[in-house]
Amino acid sequence: MRILRNILIGLVAIVALLLVVGFFLPRHVIVERDLVVDAPPEAVFPHVSSLQAFSEWSPWGDLDPDMVVEYSGPDTGVGNVMEWTSEHPNVGNGRQEIVELAENESVRTELDFGDMGTAEAWWRLVPEGEGTRVVWGLDADMGAGPIGRWFGLMMDGLVGADYERGLARLQETVEG
């Protein structure tokens, strides 16, 4: 009986330690990937300043052919909105809106994943030789609770590969 009690006390102590440590993990998680596209920023910008154009090279579009996507606002620039619904667990439901842009330099969007939370995403276009370094980033708020913050430690692994695949598709689209 004493062994069982000690095991139980040990388990409670481990869970308590994990919860306390969770509160000290970062609330915001940033994921960034970049790739050089063999084209000037002016050739890349139309593909990131329109969510309709983004859908053509998005890494998530092929995951669910039944995904329903609706657009509103202008076709490009600030106020361009994309909303999607999907039963696929890696796609889910959400809304993305372009909230800021600097022509041929950067685009910033706000994402709303409903119960999954909110995030900010961006594309930066940096001239590099004859080409453009495209930086795609995400700043996700993992919430105030320790469980979300522990989950934040996995965000780079979960989203990074998708960003790499998307940037490769953007490169094919622009260079092709």
Image: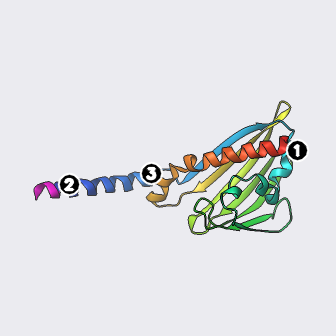
On the image, numbered disc 1 is attached to which residue?
A: 43
**Which residue shows up at 21% across the image and 58% down it?**
8
Labelled pair 1, 3 in contact (Cβ < 8 Å): no
In the figure, residue 68 lies in which quadrant?
bottom right
On the image, numbered disc 3 is attached to which residue?
A: 24
Task: Note whether 130 is above or below 137 in the view shown.
Answer: above
On the image, numbered disc 2 is attached to which residue?
A: 7
| Main SS class of the magenta portion in the image | helix
Does the stretch in magenta take in 2? yes
**Amino acid at the residue labelled 1:** Ala
The answer to whether any part of residue 55 appears in the image is yes
The part of the chain drawn in magenta is 1-5
Q: Residue furthest top?
A: 129
The C terminus appears in which quarter of the rendering? top right
**Amino acid at the residue labelled 3:** Phe
Kind of element beneath mark 3:
helix
In three-dimensional space, the C-alpha distance between marks 1 and 2, rounded to whole angstroms, equals: 63 Å
What x and y, as percent, mark residue 56? Answer: 79, 55
What x and y, as percent, mark residue 150? Answer: 46, 53
**Which residue shows up at 82% across the image and 61% down it?**
78
Residue count near mark 1 (Cα–Cα under 10 Å), binned few <14, some 14–19, many ≥20: some
